[in-house]
Amino acid sequence: MATRNDPARSFNFLLSFDNMQGSVGFSECSGLSTDADIAEYREGADKSLSTRKLTGLQKHAHITLKRGVTKNLDLWTWRKNIIEGTQDRRSGTITLLDELQQPVLHWKITAAWPVKYEGPGLNAKGNDVAIETLELVHEGLDLESA
């Protein structure tokens, strides 16, 4: 009997970074993408009217993380280190889980640091969860199967 290979759902994931207590829970994670510049090249002796496309600089999008505000100040402390001029780059892993809480994929992040912190929008008329946002820059993203 064939085993089904259903797609994983996007709502079940964990984050862990160096120098942080355990896994950090977030409600949203975006920016897991890479792209490259394209360098067009044509040799002088080439008689064709087209160019060759060569791989240029590799780029990684900023990773945006959102979570409900808690008393845990790990993320703010990390951002504060950067504000105060301390080099605090950390590697980490974003793990996508299946319905049984088993790992499906791991995105490995290299040399990340928070470039932006945004506190929650506060509104006395609402009852929404207070959400804080952290934006990370990094030097590498790798995808591994669990």
Image (cartoon, rainbow, N blue to C red):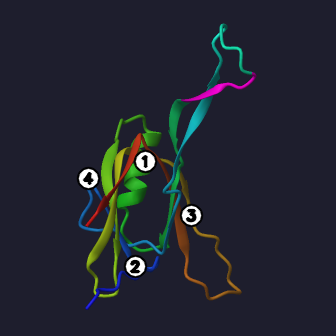
**Which-is-in-front pick, marks 4 and 3?**
4
The local crowd at label 1, few if under 14, some if 14 to 19, many if 20 or more residues have their Cα within 10 Å, is some
User: Which quadrant would residue 110 be assigned to in this image?
Assistant: top left
Q: Secondary structure at mark 2?
A: loop
**Pointer 1 or 2: first along the chain:** 2
* Residue at the disc numbered 4: 18
Q: Position of residue 136 (x, y in %)?
A: 47, 50
Question: Could you tell me how far apart the alpha carbons at marks 2 and 3 are, in whole angstroms?
Answer: 23 Å
* Residue at the disc numbered 3: 119
**Pointer 1 or 4: first along the chain:** 4
| Residue ID at (47%, 41%) | 83
* Residue at the disc numbered 2: 12
Q: Position of residue 127 (x, y in %)?
A: 62, 88
Q: Is residue 44 above or below residue 18?
A: above
Q: Position of residue 144 (x, y in %)?
A: 30, 58
| Residue ID at (40%, 82%) | 6
Does the magenta-highlighted stretch encompass residue 32?
Answer: no
Q: Residue farthest to the top?
A: 45
Residue range highlighted in magenta: 49-54
Residue type at mark 1? Lys
Labelled pair 2, 3 in contact (Cβ < 8 Å): no
Q: Is residue 13 above or below residue 52?
A: below
Residue 80 numbered mark, or none: 1
**Pointer 3 or 1: first along the chain:** 1
